[in-house]
Amino acid sequence: MTERTSSGLEIIAVANQKGGVGKTTTAINLATAMAAVEKRVLLIDLDPQGNASTGLGVGAERRDVNAYHLLMGEAPLARAAIGTDIPGLDLVPSGMDLSGAEIELVNTERREFRLHQALGHGAGGYDYVFIDCPPALGLLTVNALVAARAVLVPLQCEFYALEGISHLINTVEVVRNNFNPTLYIQGIVLTMFDGRNNLSNMVANDVRAYFGDTVFKTVIPRNVRVSEAPSHGRPVLVYDTRCAGSRAYLHLAGEVLRRERRANA
C-alpha cells in the first residue's frame, strides 16, 4: 500500500475523467511551481494523448522510452525519466504504446499496482511526483490512484461539473477500500473561472457549498496566456510569469504545500 516515505516523497494524482477541464495545465504548472521553490519534481504523463509531454516541449524523438515501458516493467524509472528545460523538473513522457496499455494490462498479475511498484523502485530521489491521468476511469487512472497518496481534482466551472465529479469520487472510494487505504482527496481546484459569467459564479458557489473546505481557495481564471503556453512547449509560469494564470498557479502551489503539511502533522 502507498504511504509517505521516510525520504519525504509525496505522490499526487491529478485526475478528472472529463476532458478539457485544465487537468494537464494544472499538472504542468503545479510541477513547475514546486520546482521553482527548489523541490525535486517528477511529472508522469500517463495520458496517451501526451499533452503534458508536448506542453513541456518534449517531442516524439525523446519519447522512445516512456510511461508504457515503465508500466510494463520494460524500463526502470531511472531510464524512463528525462530532464526538461525546467531546472529540477523531470518527466516520464507519454507514448503511442500507452494507448494499448489498458488492454495489455487486463490479464497481468497485480495489474493495479504496476505504477506503484515502478515508483517504489526509484522515486526516492524526488520530493514530489505528479501524475497526469487520462480523462477516463480505466486501468491507467486506477494505477495512478493506487500509486498516489493524494488526489487533486481540477473542476471546470460549467453546468455538468458536479455531476461528473461524483464518478471520480466513487472511484477514489473503491481504490481506497480495495487497494490504497491512505488515499485521500487533497482538494478540488476550480478552473477556467470567468468572474463576469453568472454561470461560473453559480457553479463555484454550488461546488463550495457541497464540498466545503475540500475546495481550494485559489481559483484558476480563464486566461489567454494559459491557453497559449502549451503551443510554445512551456508552462505558463515560464511563458508569462506575470499573467493572472501564473499568479493563480503560484497561489495554488502554496495551498498544496500547506495542505500537505497539515496532512502530515
Image: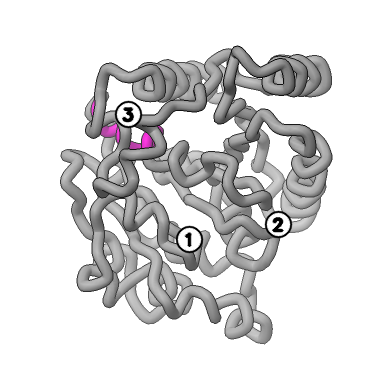
- The magenta region covers 29-36
Q: CA distance from mark 3 to mark 1?
A: 20 Å
Q: Which residue is mark 2?
A: 179
The secondary structure type at the circle numbered 2 is loop
Residue type at numbered disc 2: Phe
Q: Main secondary structure of the magenta part?
A: helix
Residue at 23% of width from left, 28% of height from top? 38
Mark before the other along the chain sequence, 2 or 3: 3
Is residue 135 a member of the stretch shown in magenta?
Answer: no
Q: Which mark is residue 33?
A: 3
Q: Which residue is mark 1?
A: 46
The secondary structure type at the circle numbered 3 is helix
- Can you say whether 190 is above or below 115 in the image? above
Give the x, y percent position of residue 264.
Answer: 54, 24
Residue at 75% of width from left, 23% of height from top? 203
Mark in the foreground, 1 or 2: 1
Q: How many residues crowd mark 1 within 10 Å: few (<14), some (14–19), many (20+)?
A: many
Give the x, y percent position of residue 74.
Answer: 37, 81
Residue type at numbered disc 3: Ala
